[in-house]
Image: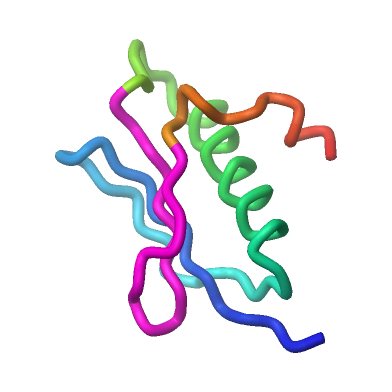
Amino acid sequence: MPTKLYRFHCTDGHELVIDLTGRRLPTLAQTRVHAERVALGLMERIERFDWSGWQVEVYDAKGRRVWIRAFVDVNVDVQAA
């Protein structure tokens, strides 16, 4: 199965955490799960008072945004998956 390169950037509209490496994933469903893991990982590593304005934005190799997920909507159960 061919894989596509996606980048997972996190932002609140003012600050930005850029994914310079990206990740190759075969399906959009796997891309969405990985995006949620990225958001959870950032929330665990950096202490912030309020993540409600943050979102993870997924971009394809051509720089097109293909999916967005607000941190507050992230499924905490994906970390164990």
How many marks can you see? 0
Most extreme residue toward the top, as rendered? Answer: 49
Up-down relation of residue 24 to residue 34 (above or below): below
Q: How is the image coloured?
A: rainbow
Up-down relation of residue 35 to residue 5 (above or below): above
Left or right? Give the position of 24 relative to 48: right
Instruction: Please state, as top left, top right, bottom left or bottom right, where the C terminus lies in the image.
Output: top right
Q: Quadrant of residue 76?
A: top right
* Residue 59 located within the stretch drawn in magenta: yes
Up-down relation of residue 65 to residue 24 (above or below): above
Q: Which residues are magenta?
A: 53-69
Provide residue 61's location: percent of width, then percent of height: 45, 81
Provide residue 79's location: percent of width, then percent of height: 74, 34
Instruction: Please state, as top left, top right, bottom left or bottom right, where the N terminus lies in the image.
Output: bottom right
Provide residue 6's location: percent of width, then percent of height: 52, 71
| 72, 22: nearer the viewer | 72
Could you tell me which residue is drawn at 19 percent across and 40 percent down?
Answer: 13
